[in-house]
Amino acid sequence: MNMKTGIKKTIGFLIALSFINIALAQEVIEVTTDVCVFHLDKINGNLVGLHWKNPDEEIIKESRLGENFRILLPLPGYEANYFISTNQKARFEKLNNGIICHYDQLINERQTLNIKVDYKIESKNGQVLFSITVNNNTDQPLAEILYGIIGGQKGLRNRSDNRTLIPGGTTNNEGEMFTRFSGGGYGGGNLGITYSATGITYPSWSMSMSWMEVFNTRENIGMYYAQQDSIIRKAALYYELRPSEKGNVIGDNWPTKTDVPEGTPIGLTMGWMNMPYTKRGVFSSAPVVLQLHHGDWHEGSHIYRHWFDKHYNVKRQPTWLRNEMAWQSIIMSNGEDVINYKFNDLPKLAADAKKYGVTTFEILGWDKGGIDRGYPEYEPDRRLGTKEDFRNALINIKKSGVHPLIFANIQWVDTDIPLYYDKLKKYETKGRWADDLILSGWGEGTISSRIGITRHNMTQMTPSYPEVNKLLMNYFLDLVKSGADGFQFDKTTSIDVDFNPLLKLSPDRAMAQAVFDMLGQVLKEGRKIDPQLAIASELIWDRAFQYVDVSYLRMNDIDMHPALKYTFPEWTSTIFAESPFDFNIMNNGMRYGLVWAMAPRHYSASLDEAVTQPLSKYVAELIRIRKKYTGILFTGRFMDTLGATVKCGENSRFSVFEPMNDTTRKAVVVVNFDNKEDNVEVNIPNGKDGKAELCIPFQNDKIVQLPAKIKLPARTCAVVVQVND
C-alpha cells in the first residue's frame, strides 16, 4: 500500500466514522432505497428525514416534526384517546427496498394495549409507499388512523416559490399552503389545539380525487401525494402548520425564526386518514404514495390517472347523454305547492328548446310533493296530471327528437311523510352520538322557505338495505318503462359516515359503497328495459365516473381550476345559465368543454320566451360551432393552456383542446369577458402548414394563417382549430 492510498483510506474511514457518529448522535436509522434515503428515529420509528435522489431534494426539513401515525381508540368518558407513534417503541425489519416498523403494543398516559401495528415504508416503481396494519383485539373502536405522515415540510427548494393543489370539482381547495396557510376550515376548526390545522374529506363536495400536489414552478419540480385506495370509503386529507400562521398579514403568513422563541420547530405536517370505527379485527390500509418529479401538477395528474385506470373503467364510448351539448331544465312544481306546468305542457316546452338545438330536457318537480319534498316517493304528482299523462308527455318529447331526463335522488328522505315514519326511519343515517340526523332542505315558493325558516327538511339513508333498495329500484325502473331516457340523480355528492347499527359495512364504507353500487345497479337493470339508459348526477367523485356521464354543477366562476377536467377528459359537467344575460357563462362552457344547461328564469320559463331569446340564439351558435369539431372541443382531450400561446387583454382567457388520440392537432378557445372588444393573437406551435379555421358566433367561419390576429367582440368567444392537410 503506498502512502497516498493509505491517506485516502484513512480519510474515507474518518468520514464514514463521522457520519456514523452523527447518526448515533441523532439516534436515527438510515435506510437507502433506489429513489430516496429515509431517516427513522431508532426508538419510535418516526420518519424524521426523507431525501429524494432525483430530483435532488430534502423533503423533511424539520426532523423534530417527523411522525408515522396517530391512532384513535376512544374510551367511554375519554373520546380523544390517541396513540401517537412518537410515544411508542418500534422494532425494525429491513426490506430489500424499505423497512417495516413493528409495534407490539400501543401506549399512552391512560392505557397500554396489546394492539400490534405494522408500519411499512418501501420504494416501488419510483414511488415511496406508506401502509399500516392495525390488529385491534379490543372492544374499543378503531376510530381514526392518520398515517403516511410527512412532517416538518417547508416546501420544495425555496418555500415562497411553492404552490399547492387539492382538487375540487372546479376549485383548488388550497393553492398557497406554503405561503398563505388557511387553518380552521372544518368542524370545530382550530379550537382546542395549539397549532393550525385543516381537513378535507374525500369523496365529498370539496374533494374530487384522492391526490394532492406540491410544486415549485420556478424550479420545475413537484411532489405527488395520494391515498391510492381501491376500496370505496370515506377518507380525509389532513394537514397542520406549527406553531401557527400569522393572522391579518399582507403576503406570506408563515411564521419565521424571528417570530418564535429560539429552538421552536416550524413546519407543515400532512397525512391521510381512515375512519373505520371497527372493533376486534385487522385493518390494513391502502398505500399512501409519495413521488417527486419534474414538472408541476399536470405531471401529478398523469401519475394519478395511471393508477386510477387499473381499478376503474372510465374509458368508454360516449353515451347519447355524453354527446349531448346542451340541456334545458324546468321545475314543474315546488315544495310550497306552486305549480308552474302540467304534464301536458312538457312537449311544447321541449319543442321550444329544440328550436335552438337543445335536445335534452331535464324535468324537475314532477314527483309527489314537488321538488325537494316527498322523497323517496318518486311517482308522478297527481296535481300535474295522471300517470298516463306523464307517460304520454315523455313519449311525445321523444317523438320530437328530444331526450327526457328525469330528476330524482338516491339517499334522501323527507322527514314529513308517513312513509318515513312507517317504514324508513329505522334506516336513516346515524351519527356518532344518539341519532345525530343530517338535515337539509331547499325552499322555493315562499320567502321564509327560501331563507330556510319553513323549508321541508330531509335526512339521508344508506340505500343498501334490501327494503330501501327494492323501493328505490321499483320507482326508477318504472320511470324507465314510462319513457325516461336517463336520470339526473341529485345531491349524491353528500356521502357521509353512517353509524346505523343495522349496516353490514363499516361506517366509513357503508354509504359510499351503497351509492356507488346503486348507480351501477340502475344502469344494469335499467338497460334491460332501455339499452341506451344514461346517468347524470350532482357529484364530482371520480370513482363514480365509471357510471356517471355528466356531473350536474352550476359553476359560474370566470376561472375554474382545470385539474379534474384535465385528469379525466372523458368527464364533463353542466354549466348553468339561469339568467337571460348569462352570455359569459355560456362562453365559459366552450372554454372548458362543458354542457350548456339552460334554466331560464331560474328553471321556470321556456327558451323561447322573449327575454331569453337572445341568449337562446347565442347558445344555438355555440352548438353550431362545437358540432363542427365535436371530437376536439367536446369529446376530445382538454389540455388546460398547454400547447398554444395567446396574447390578449387582461380580461380574456383561453384553453386548448386536442383529439383524444391525436396529439398533433390542437384547437384554442378564447373568451373575452370584457365589455369592450379585445385584440387577440393565437398561435399553435408546430402546425403543419400554419392554417386554422376561425369560428366566432354570428360571423362567417373562415380560414386564417397562424398566428391568427382576431378582433374579439365583448362577451364573446372565438374558436381556432388547426385544419387538416
Image: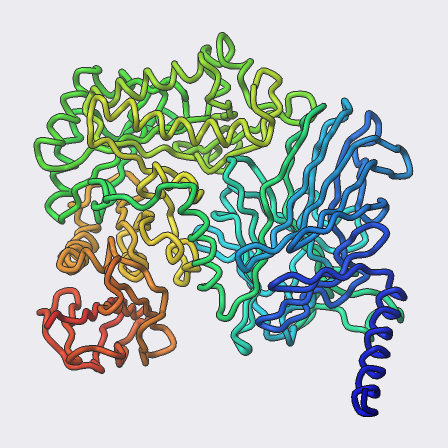
Instruction: Point out the image quarter for the N terminus.
Output: bottom right
360 relative to 647, above or below = above
202 relative to 420, above or below = below
Residue 373 in the image: x percent, y percent? 41, 24
61 relative to 476, above or below = below
Residue 21 in the image: x percent, y percent? 88, 70
Residue 308 in the image: x percent, y percent? 44, 47
Left or right: where does residue 18 sit relative to residue 370?
A: right
Residue 241 in the image: x percent, y percent? 72, 59
Q: Name the residue at 15% across, 25% down.
A: 393
- Does residue 184 appear in the picture of this structure? no
Instruction: Point out the image quarter for the C terminus.
Output: bottom left
- Does residue 454 appear in the picture of this structure? yes
Left or right: where does residue 250 sit relative to residue 138?
A: left
* Count of numbered marks: 0
Q: Name the residue at 65% across, 43% down.
A: 273
Closest to the observer, 339 or 711: 711
Q: Name the residue at 69% across, 56% down.
A: 150
Left or right: where does residue 35 sit relative to residue 117?
A: left
